[in-house]
Structure formats: structure tokens, C-alpha cells
Image: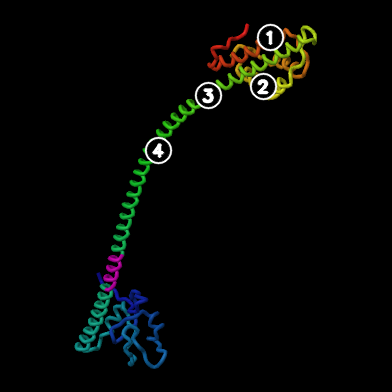
């Protein structure tokens, strides 16, 4: 492959094929660079080589050379010269060519070194990037493994806590059931006692009113209840009647019916001060005893001495 000369300006490096400016210091430039640098038309009295800054004092120190001469030019250029001059010209031409070839080799070697250094730097950088990427991948794999272990641990902990919660809930329900049973058993004697006391109080008041009726207020009729009986019925006693009436309404399965109509109509006449027939006193007494026993029997705490009236 034939070597091609190039412009010796580093920023140009154009390939020279037709014409070029050659100097006696063995440098060659393209026509455009020679014109820009003042080799063809100097800006002052002296010319300097753009490559080696040598002073070109003589007119023939920088001339235009045809790089692709015609056959006629080749025939006439050395015609008339002695063999010694021809050999000298040929030798200097070969020296110029060897110098340009050597400089081009040096330039290419310098470029190769620069490219090798850039490749080594790029390879080192790439290895660092690969190493960092592998380290990051390993770190992320470790985090993923740790996260998986944490998830497994949390799942096991959740199952354990769920089982503990179920056990605690079951224990709470059992404790609450025992508490409600104990509370019901504790309250039942008091309720039964209050109902029995209320019935006894009404019976005593009924007997007293019957005694007053026999004292001269007409046979078969009774006077209003005494003041302490009215207070008891309007206060604590009446509240027991209301509770008993409400409990019968809430628990209709006892089989006693809905006693509100009869109870309130009968008791309303007693509490309002109206006179009641003596025959109804025994009915009211039996009814109240029946209610007290029925409530205690439904709760499972019926006293042995209590019996429902017939």
C-alpha cells in the first residue's frame, strides 16, 4: 500500500494528492493552510515554518510542488541536469519522503499510545463499574434475603400472637360468662327477697285496711290504705312492682301472661285512695305472692317456704 502524505498542520492533517507547499526543512502543507499561515504570501519580510518554526529566508525555501506530475513534466523536470545533480535531487527527495514517513509513524505510534491509554482507562473504569455493580447486586441480594427472613419471622410471630389472642379471647369469654353467672346468682336472692318483702308489705296493708273496713265504714268496702302503705307503694314498693311487671313483659315464657292491665288497674285504685271491695284484697294478695314465687322459680332461686297460690 502506497504511503500518502498529509498536511503537517496537526489540526488539519488533510491528505495531499495534487499540489502542496514543501519547505527546505522537509515539511509539507496543503495550499489552504499555506495561504492562511503566510507561506505563499508572507505577511512580513520573513517566513517561518508552521511545524518547526524554522526561518525560511530564501525564495526557494517554500515552493509549490506537483504531487501527481504528468509524463511530460517528468521528462522535462530533470532534463539537462548532470547525473550528479539528478542523484542529489533524488537523494534529497528520498530523504524528504523518509522523514515524512518517519514522522507519520511517530504520529501514529503516539496516537496508538494515547488510544491504548484511553482503552486501559476505559477498561479499568469498566472493571470498577462491574465490581461496584456486583457489590451492589450482592448487597441487594443480602437485603432481599434479610427481608425474606424478616417476613418469615413476622409471619411466625403473627401466627403466635394470633393464637395467643384466640386463647385470651376464649379465656375472656369464659371469665365473662362466669362473671355474669356469678352476678346473676348474687342478684337473684336480693330480687326474690325484695319481691317477697313487697308482697308481705302489701298483705299487711291489706289486712289493716280490712280491719279498718270492719270498724264501721260499711260491709264489703275498705278505706284508703294507711299513709305508710301509700309511701311504700309510691316509693320503693312501687318501683319493685314496676320492675316485676317489666321483667314479666321481657320474659313472657314464664306462662304468667301480661299482668300489667289487671295489676295497674287494681293498684291504681288502691294508690289513688279509692275504696276497694274486700273480695279483691285476697285476689290481689294471691296475685302478688304468685308473681314473687314465679320470678324466683324462673331464676332458679325459689324459696322452699314459698308456694304459688291457687
Nearer to me, 285 or 42: 285
What residue sits right under mark 4 in the picture? 158
**Mark nearer the viewer, 4 or 1:** 1
Q: Position of residue 176 (x, y in %)?
A: 49, 28
Q: Which residues are magenta?
A: 110-121
Residue 12 appears at what percent x and percent y? 37, 76
User: In this image, 294 relative to 95: left or right?
Assistant: right
Numbered disc 2: secondary structure: helix
Q: Magenta span: helix, strand or loop, mainly?
A: helix
For the rendered model, the colour scheme is: rainbow
Q: CA distance from mark 2 to mark 1?
A: 18 Å
Q: Secondary structure at mark 3?
A: helix
Q: CA distance from mark 1 to mark 3?
A: 31 Å
- Residue contact between numbered discs 1 and 3, judged by CB atoms under 8 Å: no
Residue 103, compared with residue 308, is above or below; it is below
Residue 164: horizontal and vertical position, in percent?
40, 34
Q: Quadrant of the N terminus?
A: bottom left
Residue carrying label 2: 237
Reading the chain from its start, which is encountered first: label 4 or label 1?
Answer: 4
Please state, as top left, top right, bottom left or bottom right, where the C terminus lies in the image.
Answer: top right
Residue underneath mark 3: 186
Q: Give the residue at the far front of this rendering.
A: 215
Residue underneath mark 1: 283
Amino acid at each position: 500500500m502506497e504511503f500518502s502524505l498529509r498536511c503537517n498542520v496537526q489540526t488539519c492533517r488533510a491528505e495531499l494528492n495534487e499540489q502542496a507547499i514543501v519547505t527546505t526543512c522537509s515539511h509539507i502543507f496543503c495550499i489552504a493552510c499555506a495561504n492562511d499561515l503566510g507561506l505563499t504570501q508572507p505577511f512580513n519580510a520573513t517566513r517561518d515554518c508552521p511545524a518547526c518554526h524554522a526561518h525560511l529566508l530564501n525564495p526557494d525555501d517554500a515552493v509549490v510542488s506537483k504531487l501527481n506530475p504528468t509524463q511530460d513534466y517528468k521528462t522535462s523536470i530533470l532534463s539537462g541536469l548532470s547525473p550528479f545533480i539528478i542523484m542529489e535531487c533524488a537523494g534529497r527527495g528520498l530523504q524528504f519522503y523518509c522523514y515524512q514517513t518517519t514522522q507519520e509513524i511517530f504520529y501514529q505510534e503516539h496516537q496508538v499510545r494515547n488510544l491504548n491509554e484511553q482503552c486501559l482507562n476505559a477498561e479499568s473504569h469498566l472493571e470498577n463499574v462491574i465490581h461496584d455493580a456486583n457489590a451492589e447486586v450482592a448487597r441487594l441480594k443480602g437485603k432481599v434475603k434479610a427481608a425474606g427472613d424478616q417476613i418469615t419471622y413476622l409471619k411466625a410471630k403473627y401466627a403466635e400472637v394470633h393464637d395467643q389472642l384466640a386463647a385470651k379471647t376464649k379465656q375472656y369469654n369464659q371469665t365473662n360468662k362466669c362473671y355474669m353467672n356469678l352476678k346473676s346468682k348474687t342478684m337473684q336472692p336480693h330480687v326474690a327477697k325484695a319481691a317477697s318483702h313487697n308482697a308481705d308489705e302489701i298483705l299487711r296493708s291489706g289486712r289493716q285496711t280490712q280491719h279498718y273496713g270492719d270498724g264501721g265504714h260499711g260491709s264489703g268496702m275498705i278505706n284508703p290504705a294507711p299513709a305508710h302503705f301509700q309511701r311504700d307503694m309510691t316509693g320503693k314498693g312501687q318501683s319493685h312492682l314496676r320492675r316485676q311487671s317489666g321483667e314479666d313483659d321481657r320474659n313472657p315464657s314464664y306462662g304468667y301472661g301480661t299482668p300489667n292491665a289487671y295489676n295497674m288497674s287494681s293498684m291504681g285504685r288502691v294508690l289513688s285512695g279509692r275504696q276497694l271491695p274486700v273480695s279483691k284484697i285476697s285476689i290481689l294478695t294471691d296475685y302478688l305472692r304468685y308473681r314473687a314465687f314465679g320470678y324466683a322459680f324462673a331464676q332458679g332461686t325459689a324459696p322452699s317456704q314459698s308456694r304459688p297460690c291457687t
